[in-house]
Image (cartoon, coloured by chain):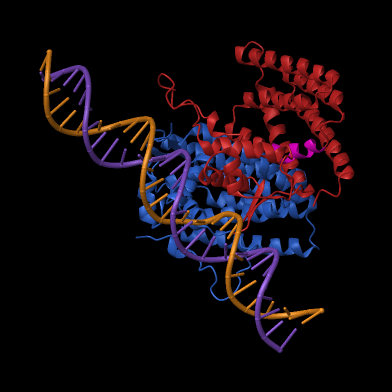
Chain colours: A red, B blue, C orange, D purple
Amino acid sequence: MNSVASQMPKRRPGGKVTPLLVPRTTLDTLVYDELRKRIVTLVYRPGSLISEVAVAEELGVSRTPVHQAFLQLSHEDLLQILPQRGALVAELSIAKVKQAQFVRESLEISAFGEVAKAWNAADPVYQEAERKILDILRQQEGTVVSRDYLAFTQLDVAFHNVILDLAGNAILLSFIHDVRAHLNRVRYLELQEAHHEQEAIDGHWKILDAIRKNDVERTTEELRLHLKMLEEFREEIFARHREIFV
Amino acid sequence: MNSVASQMPKRRPGGKVTPLLVPRTTLDTLVYDELRKRIVTLVYRPGSLISEVAVAEELGVSRTPVHQAFLQLSHEDLLQILPQRGALVAELSIAKVKQAQFVRESLEISAFGEVAKAWNAADPVYQEAERKILDILRQQEGTVVSRDYLAFTQLDVAFHNVILDLAGNAILLSFIHDVRAHLNRVRYLELQEAHHEQEAIDGHWKILDAIRKNDVERTTEELRLHLKMLEEFREEIFARHREIFV
DNA sequence: CGCTTGCAGCTTGCATGCAAGTGTGCAAGC
DNA sequence: GCTTGCACACTTGCATGCAAGCTGCAAGCG
């Protein structure tokens, strides 16, 4: 029994837990996170049917939080609820991936451009960000050597997030979080194999360089190339797994 | 008693209701739509506290669908749920409006550009779209004369939607739908007064013209100007209602 | 043998009961 | 008059019970 409920912090472990700063830890959030992870990492096979009761029993909670998580996931198009039948794990759809790619590209290019424009090496906020980025890139070089492609992917997300955080746009950030689910799901089809990791890291370095020089043009152009590369990489995966996509 | 439940279609009024095409009419969707409308149109005052029970009783449903609607609205930042106290209607925040504006501009410019590139007057899909647009613009001219600013706003949304539909990107469309809530809320502060309606319509005509000529550059530029105009218009409202914003 | 029909077992949608946390007002004591 | 503590009313989070719909299968009929 993999009880998600047991991960819930006790309400008052000794004193107040600053209720307004902590986002709100509720069971449906935990269930949602867990299910989302399973869908994105393809633990739940695309097209398979899952039921609220089954998930609820497995996670050790009642149907209520599971139901709420299902609703949320269906809003993100990761689940399709069939009224009296169950919930269908979203199929891998090339069309949907392309839509997600389009949205991501549009938003990231705008955001990265803003960051490049505003970058100020004298400001401690940017110094802190630069430290984090350098750290991420160094670690990422390591994952190529050790062939740890899962860690590579997570660091990739981290790199983009540090820069997007600088843009200070919570709405944009949350939208990108949403579309990434559809994009990353494709990656998990071939996670154990090598692809274009070094190429991706080179792209990251170039982007960082352009941002540090406040070169908006070059930042957006390098990002465009970087995303284009990832797109072609996905095209290869499409080709190799054509039978899975609808 | 304004019963939302009574608007629910009977499950089987005489035959099958094509269960898969109809999106899924559930109570929580109806409650969600109703509450969202009230928040956007400022019927619920920003900063006020509402409770699930109160809403449930007023709408004639139980707490469950209301609870689900609250959760959904809190994801869109239109409601902030305070654990054992109630739900706070989101304050009008200049920062948030600017974030929404940034996202909208980024997405719409990309989408309109795509549509301009793909526009094909020989294709019936585009002919149909053109008919709709012309119809909308004509109606909109009428609302300026009759000073029906509510209808004007709705037609404004309709114009943008027809073009966005042509882009065929459901994810993008749903994101724009989300951010529009934050942008339109500002409009409702002064809905009964005249602003720059004619200017906005002129912008629409210019955009349509550029799209029809497949002129991507001019389309995005005109749209940028159009949105810029709306932005300045919002700035004026900010200035006149500074005390409401946080 | 093929077709229909009804039933059983599943599913989700919604209502409701219970528990736990928060704020408020009043009363008692200083 | 002021402070302090407590009880109560009210909130949401979650579990559970009930109703209604969908699917598949088996029995019965032509």
Q: Position of residue B15 (x, y in %)?
A: 59, 75
Image coords of residue C13 (percent x, y) = 52, 56
Q: Which residues are magenta?
A: A180-189
Place of residue B14 in the rendered image (x, y in percent of width and height, measured from the top left) = 56, 76
Q: In this orientation, which residue lies closer to the viewer: B133 or B29?
A: B29
Identity of the residue drawn at 61% across and 35% down: A1
Q: Residue at x 52, y 36 (%)?
A: A27
Tell me if residue B139 is in the magenta stretch.
no
Please determine whether, in this image, residue A207 is positioned above or below residue C6.
Answer: above
Q: Main secondary structure of the magenta part?
A: helix
Q: Is residue A235 above or below residue A210?
A: below
Image quarter of residue B223: top right
**Residue in the picture at 41% in, 18% down:** A14
Give the percent coordinates (x, y) of residue A239. 89, 44
Residue drawn at (74%, 47%) of the image: A46
- Would residue B177 be seen by someone viewing this image from the given angle? no
